[in-house]
Image (cartoon, rainbow, N blue to C red):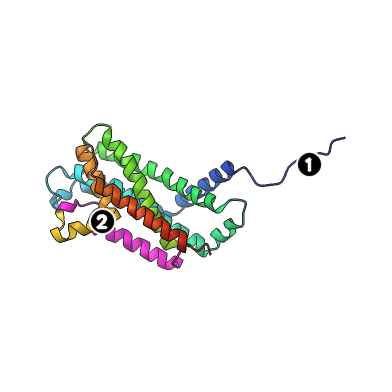
Amino acid sequence: MSLDLSPRPGAARTPAMLAAQARMELRLLARNGEQLLITLVVPLLLLVAGTRSGKVVDLGAGRPIDIVTPGVLGLAVLSTSFTSLAIATGFERRYGVLKRLGASPLPRWGLLVGKVAAVVVVEVVQLVLLASVALALGWSPAGGVAPWLWLVVLAVLGTAAFGSLGLLIAGTLRAEATLAVANLVYVLLLVGGGLIVPLSRYPDGAQGLLQLLPSGALGEGLRTAFDAGTVDLLPLVVLTAWAAVGTALTARTFRWE
């Protein structure tokens, strides 16, 4: 006579736990109106307004939609991998969510993998939606397939750089301070970080500094990619360096509770 022990209690398999964690992160993002505003509404409004920006801001030679669109794609990466990730993680840490997940069968690296997976899914939706709207508004990128491949490379490097910095803030500051700093940095980089407006339109003395910021490197790299079909080495080096420094500092300072 065999002994029936079903149902068998125990942890789910690791892939199932990671998929469940990623789905939970996406549901939390979809229910947060402020994060949807930053990740989707603001980039879309700037993209549409960019078609008329030539009458307000001197963006240089060329059609405004061709100049603004690469910057808006970069803004989408910034909003999701930095601002949204930092705020969500900061409040999860405050409410003890991270501490409780740390005591669950889900390993801590699994929690980070779930967050990264959710960020990647949101960014794919953002970039496809924004590029589709831009094409409908008359955007005509040059270079064939090459700039789209560079978009993937720059988005990965930008996500690594901004994501590590977002986790650095969320893991060291209080939730309220994380909210304030993440939104302040977002606005500062949007207005004067070389993301939307080309670096050539800034004063000569500021261009050297801005091209060393992750926002300036991402914006300039995307504009060059969709204008010439290739990317200079400097934006790639700058984003890689920010990602390495941000990751190292986060690994040393991140507090789970």
Q: Main secondary structure of the magenta part?
A: helix
Marks 2/1 in contact by CB < 8 Å: the verdict is no
Residue 226 placement (x, y as % from top left): 23, 39
Residue 99 placement (x, y as % from top left): 57, 61
The verdict on residue 175 being magenta is yes
Residue under numbered circle 1: 5
Q: Residue at x 49, y 48 (%)?
A: 113
Residue under numbered circle 2: 212
Q: Nearer the viewer, residue 27 or 79?
A: 79
Residue 27 visible? The answer is no
Q: Range of the magenta residues?
A: 171-200
Residue at the far left: name it: 61
Residue 232 placement (x, y as % from top left): 23, 44
The verdict on residue 147 being magenta is no
Q: Secondary structure at mark 1?
A: loop
Q: Secondary structure at mark 2?
A: loop
- Closest to the camera, between mark 2 and mark 1, is 2
Residue 167 vs residue 63: left or right? Answer: right
The image quadrant that residue 65 belongs to is top left
